[in-house]
Image (cartoon, helix red, strand yellow):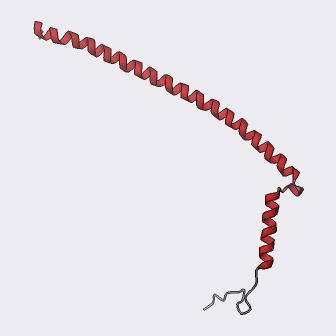
Amino acid sequence: MSLKLVELQVALPRTQDVGKLQEELQQRARHTQDHLTAEHLKEESDKRKQVNKYDETTKSKLNNDHKGSNGMNDSEKNRKQKKQKQKQQETHHPYKGNLIDIEG
């Protein structure tokens, strides 16, 4: 299989183009990997900061709980008082009972 002069004129420039394309693909892979690594490092640092912020919020919440009596803050007390008032305000119907007869 011998190559003619015309075929060589077409084949040689294309080998250079293929070499450039391969180099670009390798650089693109490196660039993608570098980008993913940088993004991963950023996420890790954000997670570390987020944990610290979470600890601060739990500490403040614990401090607020200790201020209220019996470990309850004001909103929990209000909810319990409202429930008690609703139970007291509920009126029972004079003709309706509390039991259901399921037997046929």
Q: Residue at x 22, y 10 (%)?
A: 13
Measuring from the top left, give residue 19's x and y in whole percent: 30, 13
Placement of 16 over or under 30, stated as above or below: above
Image position, residue 1 (x, y; %): 11, 11
Q: Is residue 87 above or below residue 44?
A: below
The residue positioned 82% from the left and 62% from the top of the image is: 77
**Could you tell whether 1 is left or right of 20 in the image?**
left
Near-viewer residue (86 or 18): 86
In the image, 11 versus 51, the foreground residue is: 51
| For residue 43, side relative to residue 24 (left or right) | right
**Outermost residue to the top:** 5
Residue lying at the far right in this picture: please name it: 69
In the rendered structure, the answer to whether residue 33 lies left or right of residue 18 reads: right
- Whole-percent x and y of residue 78? 80, 63
Q: Quadrant of residue 51?
A: top right
Q: Which quadrant holds residue 68? A: bottom right
Figure disc tally: 0
Q: Quadrant of residue 44?
A: top right
- Which residue is at a point 71% across and 93% down the rendered structure image? 95
**Front one among 94 and 51:** 94
The quadrant the C terminus occupies is: bottom right
> Which of these two is toward me, 15 or 83?
83
- The residue that appears at 72% across and 86% down in the rendered structure is 98
Expressed as whole percent of the image width and height from the top left, the position of residue 100 reads: 67, 87
Q: In this view, does 40 lie above or below 70?
A: above
